[in-house]
Every structure is written in structure tokens, then in C-alpha cells.
């Protein structure tokens, strides 16, 4: 949704955040697909945007611990 602006503004930082989260939580079969999407997104980010995406992902993880 964030990549294409469907229902939300386009936001590559959010794409990167959610791609990181998806990659981390995916099973082995899906992990490669999500990692590829994440890696494509990172190419268009500045170092500051990448750091912000990582920070947002860590914040999400802290608020939603896995049991």
C-alpha cells in the first residue's frame, strides 16, 4: 500500500519498515521474497531514511513482542 500509495500516501520509509518486519516474521519460504522487496526499497532511500525505517521497525518490535 505504501509503495503504490493505495489508500495512504506513498512512503518508502514505511515500505522499508514493513518489509523489514515481514522479512523477520516470515517463514523460510516467504523470507526471500520479502527480503528482495526490502532490498529494492533500500536502493531509493537516503542513509537517514534507512535509519528512520530501522528505528520504526525496532519501535514496532518493542511494542509487539513475540511470545
Image (cartoon, rainbow, N blue to C red):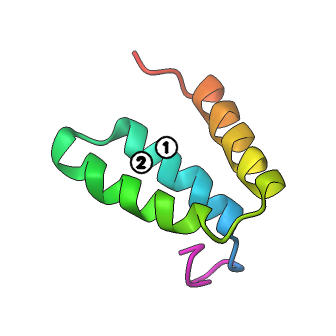
The one nearer the camera, 14 or 42, is 42
Identify whether 4 is placed above or below 42: below
Describe residue 25's horizontal placement relative to residue 5 as left or right.
left
Spot occupied by residue 16 in the image (x, y as percentages of width and height): 59, 57
Query: Which residue is the site of mark 2?
Result: 22
Spot occupied by residue 29 in the image (x, y as percentages of width and height): 16, 48
Identify whether 55 is placed above or below 1: above
Spot occupied by residue 62 in the image (x, y as percentages of width and height): 64, 24
Identify whether 11 is placed above or below 25: below
Within-10-Å neighbours for mark 2: few <14, some 14–19, many 20+: some
Secondary structure state at the residue bearing disc 2: helix
Report which quarter residue 2 is drawn in.
Answer: bottom right
Q: Residue, x 38% and y 60% (percent of image)? A: 36
Describe residue 16's horizontal placement relative to residue 10 as left or right.
left
Which corner quadrant holds the C terminus?
top left
Secondary structure state at the residue bearing disc 1: helix
Identify whether 60 is placed above or below 17: above
Q: Farthest residue to the right: give it.
A: 48
Query: Which residue is the site of mark 1?
Result: 21
Marks 1 and 2: CB-CB under 8 Å? yes
Describe residue 35's horizontal placement relative to residue 11 as left or right.
left
Amino acid at each position: 500500500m505504501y509503495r503504490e500509495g493505495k489508500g495512504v500516501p506513498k512512503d518508502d520509509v514505511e515500505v522499508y519498515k514493513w518489509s523489514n518486519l515481514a522479512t523477520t516474521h516470515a517463514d523460510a519460504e516467504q523470507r526471500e521474497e520479502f527480503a528482495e522487496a526490502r532490498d529494492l526499497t533500500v536502493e531509493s532511500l537516503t542513509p537517514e531514511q534507512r535509519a528512520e525505517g530501522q528505528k520504526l521497525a525496532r519501535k514496532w518490535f518493542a511494542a509487539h513482542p513475540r511470545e
